[in-house]
Amino acid sequence: MTTMTGTAPGLREFKMPDVGEGLTEAEILKWYVQPGDTVTDGQVVCEVETAKAAVELPIPYDGVVRELRFPEGTTVDVGQVIIAVDVSGGTSAVEPAAQAPVAEAPATTETPAGGEPAEPKPEGRQPVLVGYGVAESSTKRRPRKGAEPRDRADGRPTADAQQAAAALQSELNGHGTAGQDTAGSGTADHGGARQRPLAKPPVRKLAKDLGVDLASVTPSGPDGVITRDDVHAAVAPAAEPEAPSVAEAPAEAPAPVAPASYDGARETRIPVKGVRKATAQAMVNSAFTAPHVTEFVTVDVTRTMKLVEELKQSPEKYGTEGLRVNPLLLIARALLVALKRHPDVNAAWDEANQEIVRKHYVNLGIAAATPRGLIVPNIKDAHAKTLPELARSLAELVTTARDGKTSPAAMQGGTITITNVGVFGVDTGTPLLNPGESAILAVGSIKLQPWVHKGKVKPRQVTTLALSFDHRLIDGELGSKFLADVAAILEQPKRLIAWT
């Protein structure tokens, strides 16, 4: 499916696609082309940031850039046109070269007199990105045969032609048959039929979440389209003032409140958007949805640190040649071993179906601090990886995150997470669960401390582990056993960690 429409012969409009699962907007970070530039099919034209990651968008056809609809830094809804390209000088990769001409007219849903042109079809092209394109219902199509032609001398459509265009748009938005009744919504047209109110998919979802019937909303957008503001206005309409009684005088209107002023020299205001906005919302949902419990254990990891040095000095012995070895690698391995012994920890709570979903795989999330904010990509099927494979996956994950190239798919489907706050010199913390997961392990800084070892006080490498878990899934006994097992493995890593 392509995300384009035509407003004039040879002009193609490229819309903001949904590059993730259910995303409704994205911010344009950088344009790689300017008006007048020549583009080819598959060429990256801009970089956008969604609520999950930064993504490069390729153009799906050849042509010359005519217009950039939004500047850099603008947040654009999915489905809005972001760039217009003139393809008249060549053949589009997603549209056959030979096609019936389309008459130039202000309305895009009209059909020239004399019948319907053949609708162009893709020639085996597959989407460039996962989730590329918007919902099929948002793609404009020419009306069916039999639509009213223009018959006014000035070229404008007749009332019947306008009604037919509105009915067609209603069909496309509502996934139903134009002119038929849509249950629970719609307004009467001149023929007595009912059509579904016009609104974009994100606005329909907002109305559904707020319990608003779109048929009762007064649209304020162009061509009668309902906007987000219209839905919010319908949720909390302004209370109509009651008519004063004969005996009492009408109350004076309150004085308008002056907007708050801010001193730009003393304050800096940063818009909340992109990864930061998604992280904030996810953490609020997590904190007030899952009942958190956090437990702590202080552990002697001297042997783990010695093993790290051994792996660096003798990589051929363990198959880690050319791989980055650090304490996080062994901590991740220890967690995977403990999960195998306590599989009930690797689960999720399904609120809709009131079920506990035990996962037979481990997608291990690693919290990574990036210039765009905190993200949590995960290593798919980490439970099935050997130590060298786990080291390679961990290195790739960290490098990709720091470069800002983590894909939305890499941050979906996690089952348990590790956050290493020790790299910032912090002893420990009480981490919040990543939404959809049951546990998260925080690793504190590793420091040389006095420790009783074999009956004597000696300097040892010590750290503190903190495990936060969802108390609906994991009770105190299971959480304690799991955390203690991770600590025991780190105290004796050679004996308990399997290399293959």
Image (tube, rainbow, N blue to C red):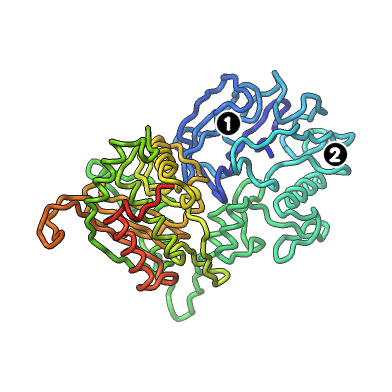
Residue closest to the eye, 58 or 358: 358
Asked whether residue 223 appears in the rendered view, the answer is yes
Image point (77%, 48%), residue name: 168
Q: Position of residue 186 (x, y in %)?
A: 72, 60
Residue closest to the eye, 354 or 441: 441
Indicate which label's residue lies in the foreground, 1 or 2.
Answer: 1
* Disc on the earlier residue, 1 or 2: 1
Task: Please give the residue where the numbered disc 1 appears in the rendered image.
Answer: 58
Amino acid type, label 1: Pro
Q: Position of residue 329 (x, y in %)?
A: 35, 46
Asked whether residue 273 appears in the rendered view, the answer is no
Q: Quadrant of residue 432?
A: bottom left
Label disc, if present, on residue 344 of the rendered structure: none
Residue closest to the eye, 444 or 402: 444
Does 461 sit left or right of 42 as displayed?
left
Q: Please tell me whether residue 170 is drawn above or below residue 292 in the rendered image.
A: above
Image point (64%, 33%), residue name: 13
